[in-house]
Amino acid sequence: QLQLQESGPGLVRPSETLSLTCTLSGASISSGPYYWGWIRQPPGKGLEWVGTIYYSGSTYYNPSLKSRLTMSIDTSKNQFSLSLRSVTATDTAVYHCARLGPGMAAAFDHWGQGALVTVSS
Amino acid sequence: DIQMTQSPSSLSASVGDRVTITCRASQSIFSYLNWYQQKPGKAPRLLIYAASSLQSGVPSRFSGSGSGTDFTLTISSLQPEDFATYYCQQSYNTLMYTFGQGTKLQNK
């Protein structure tokens, strides 16, 4: 049974970098054909796709975040990570990691429970 | 970007009711539309993928239909555990996934 677990600091200061890691259990991140993604949700608001990464390292970012975002994957640790630079209060959200199937009929079918990250001084 | 618009934004219903939620895309997305359920403090749960395919383990009272720009999620007989917020999401543009704003289903 695939499980995903987010980890990282819950509080980040404005202008600094938000870093989160998603650790998989029950499946290999490099087994394919799945992609791995981040989706965030500001408190009381809807869902926003952040970005997606394939085990080969190919990345796809939300254009509105692209200039500040880096995603990476560590197959040896069965993890993938997110780094969002120069954060502001608008980046405060619950960040979920999730598995995405391949192709256009893809859906986010397994989710982590989410990690609340607050941007505040 | 493909904009996804759900209606209504909130809905009050009773156990046993038939409930329909609508999602409209700003351009044709063929059948590349997914539906999720989210309860407070929990991660979203995939209900329907590719507009009408039921995800494994999801009760058959949930169904999806539509293609092009107009889609619906139907709950045939509302159960107490179905009160939640529902989101649609398009997967046609794989370079920019977008979600609807959500529909909150409340107990009347």
Image (cartoon, rainbow, N blue to C red):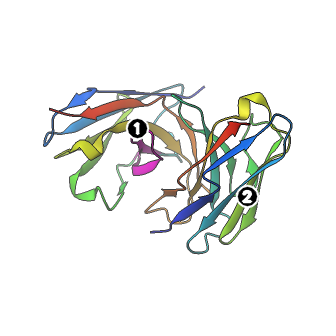
Residue sticking out furthest to the bottom: B27
Residue B27 vertical position relative to residue A116 in the rendered view, above or below: below
Please tell me whether the stretch drawn in magenta is mainly helix, strand or loop.
strand
Looking at the rendered structure, which numbered label has been put on residue A43?
1
In depth, the one of A84 and B12 nearer the eye is B12
What span is in magenta?
A36-55
Determine if marks 1 and 2 fall on one subunit: no
Q: Chain of mark 2?
A: B
Indicate the quadrant containing the C terminus of chain A: top left, top right, bottom left or bottom right.
top left
Q: Cα distance, mark 1 to mark 2?
A: 26 Å
Percent x, y of residue B76: 85, 44
Q: Residue at x 69, y 34 (%)?
A: B83
Labelled pair 1, 2 in contact (Cβ < 8 Å): no
Q: Is residue A52 left or right of residue A99?
A: left
Residue A50 vertical position relative to residue B85 in the rendered view, above or below: below
Question: Considering the numbered disc 2 on the image, is that residue within a helix, a strand or a loop?
Answer: strand
Q: Is residue A82 left or right of residue A98?
A: left
Residue at numbered disc 2: B72
Closer to the eye: label 1 or 2: 1
Indicate the quadrant containing the N terminus of chain A: top left, top right, bottom left or bottom right.
top right
Q: Residue at x 82, y 34 (%)?
A: B15
Residue sticking out furthest to the front: B108
Q: Is residue A100 left or right of residue A115?
A: right
In depth, the one of B8 and B100 nearer the eye is B8
Q: Residue at x 39, y 37 (%)?
A: A95
Answer whether residue B2 is magenta in the image.
no
Percent x, y of residue A42: 39, 42
Percent x, y of residue B64: 76, 54
Which image quadrant is residue A8 in?
top left
Residue A6 vertical position relative to residue A43 in the rendered view, above or below: above
Q: Residue at x 44, y 31 (%)?
A: A114
